Amino acid sequence: MSYYLGLDAGGTKTFCLAGDDTGVILGFGRAGAGNYECAGIPAAMAEIQQAISGALGSAGLKLDQITGIGMGVGGADLPEDYVMLEKELFTPLLGKLPRVFRNDSMAGLRGGTKEPFGIVIACGTGCVCAGINRAGKECRVGGINEDFGDMVSGSSLGTEGLKAVWRSRDGITGPTLLTAKFLERSGCPDVDAFFREMYYGRITYDDLQPMAKLVFDAAYEGDAIACDILEWGGVYLAKMVTAVARHLDMCADTFDVVTTGSAFKGISPVLIDAMSTTIHRECPKARPVRALFEPVVGALLLGMELDAPMTEDRYTVLSGSLEEAEARFGVSFMAQ
């Protein structure tokens, strides 16, 4: 029997799964931010160590029993990042343990589809798009920050909703349901009072979160301005997808476009519909799909595939075992 680990190290949390070569989940560990850009190398190493130790402990395993580990690592953006992380973090932590690590977006892609190729578009705190073609060539666009061109995220959709409230207040645009929704969220009696509370810093952006939900709710109720915001977001996300597809010569191919992140969980279909329509114009065989599994499962699959490709039988065992693991550990591993 061979045993594997899957690690998802992000900006707010780090998850680790332990499983065997049949697809049975044996253990799980969690910790805080494992993204070195957020926490620094020493703190990230400590969090990653805690998550790995938790997975090994709950599985009744030791690190020297592990055959391989797959890792999705936030902050691994450039080739030199991989060199630095290998030298300063993973070699001291894991020694000679066989491993594969990618940017966390690639773990999201691997967990999102059963196919070994495709494109993932992740939109939550930030946005990033990554893909791999049938030949194994990889590409990523976005995912750094707004200063480097990122435009659409859950945060930016919410901010655009708030801007729409101010434009409506000034008469630049017409009335919008967003005004009532932001007033309810803020507890202010009217838009002028709301303006003053924000102007003087007595209400902050953090006090209004999650603002993107207000935009999705208003769009679901038919608000034209909210719909325009989501359509703008969907078109931009589609352009990220088609850019990756062009870089990888995939525009004529059939492939999954895995959607993941909070922006794809909103109640209104406007964003995903706008994105799908725009993708179809350039990549008519692309199939937008919701992710099958959370990124930590994708990382585990990367580890398992160090030795052998996944089969349908292994997927069947894995899916059933993940449901049991959700009940055991109180964590969702099947993408919602």
Image: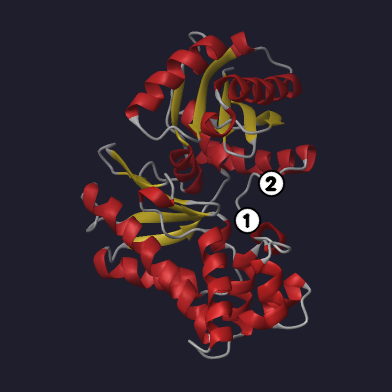
Residue 238 drawn above or below residue 26 = below
Mark 1 to mark 2: distance in Å?
Answer: 8 Å
Percent x, y for residue 138? 31, 39
Residue at left offset 52%, top offset 89%: 171
Residue at 50 percent of width and 36 percent of height: 74
Vertical relation: 164 (above or below) 54: below
Q: Are marks 1 and 2 in contact (CB under 8 Å)?
A: yes
**Secondary element type, mark 1:** loop
Image quarter in which the N terminus is found: top right
Along the viewing direction, whichever of 60 and 212 lies nearer the viewer: 212
What residue is shown with label 1? 336
Amino acid at pointer 2 = Ser
Where residue 259 appears, as percent x and y from the top left, is: 48, 56
Q: Residue at image x 54%, y 50%?
A: 292
Q: x and y percent of residue 150 in the render? A: 40, 54
* Residue 34 percent coordinates (x, y): 59, 30
Note whether residue 98 is visible: yes
Q: Which residue occupies 57% across, 90% down?
A: 175
Residue corresponding to mark 2: 332
Residue 191 as seen in the image, left or right of residue 245: right
